[in-house]
Amino acid sequence: MTPGERVKCLLQVQAASAGQKRFKGPIDVVKVLYKEGGIRSIYKGTCATLLRDVPASGMYFMSYEWLKRSMAPAGKEGELSPLNTVVAGGFAGMLNWSVAIGPDVLKSRLQTAPEGKYPNGIRSVFMDIMKNEGPRALFKGAAPVMIRAFPANAACFLGYEVAIKFLNTVAPNL
């Protein structure tokens, strides 16, 4: 996820700010970062990304499996209708982001900050946010993320389940 996350965040911040653009595109971001700070600069925020993705992914797959089993008809464990798959996948995505949103804010701030602003990495970002903005700042953007999470993950799991059923039909003993 990291250099892609770093590149994405820098391009998003650049697009949102007024004035002259620093980067021409994703490849230019990598070139500029490498020239300014070497490979380490390109991978800035890797630990922060892991702090977001590891627990969030655990919540994502755990909640999907739990919902899938809870919603399955008696005697047909794990077999869901397409509608129930959409519901289970959508809620799993929302639960994923309920765990990920705070660490995602920290990660994005770290990855878009000028060099040297946060000398202790994500800890410095956290302390700065708590001191200057308070805990609510960790949930900035939660509403649009949740609105996007349901349909995006509903479609993802529906596609996954359809693909699994297709592959089990085509190659049943694989």
Image (cartoon, helix red, strand yellow):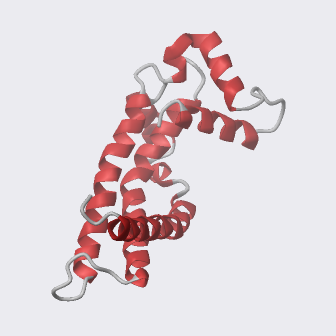
Q: In the displayed structure, would residue 173 be above or below residue 1?
A: below
Residue 135 visible somewhere in the drawing: no
Q: Nearer the viewer, residue 134 or 39?
A: 39
Q: Residue at x 35, y 71 (%)?
A: 169
Image quadrant where residue 117 sits: top right
Q: In the displayed structure, would residue 19 be above or below residue 75?
A: above
Q: In the displayed structure, would residue 55 be above or below residue 145?
A: above
Q: Residue at x 60, y 23 (%)?
A: 114
Q: Quadrant of the C terminus?
A: bottom left
Tell me: 96 left or right of 142.
left
Q: In the displayed structure, would residue 76 be above or below residue 130?
A: below
Tell me: 104 left or right of 16.
left
Q: Residue at x 68, y 31 (%)?
A: 26
Q: Position of residue 156 (x, y in %)?
A: 47, 64
Residue 148 visible somewhere in the drawing: yes
Which residue ends up furthest to the left in the rendered image? 75
Tell me: 159 left or right of 32.
left
Total numbered badges shown on the rendered structure: 0
Image quadrant where residue 125 sits: top left
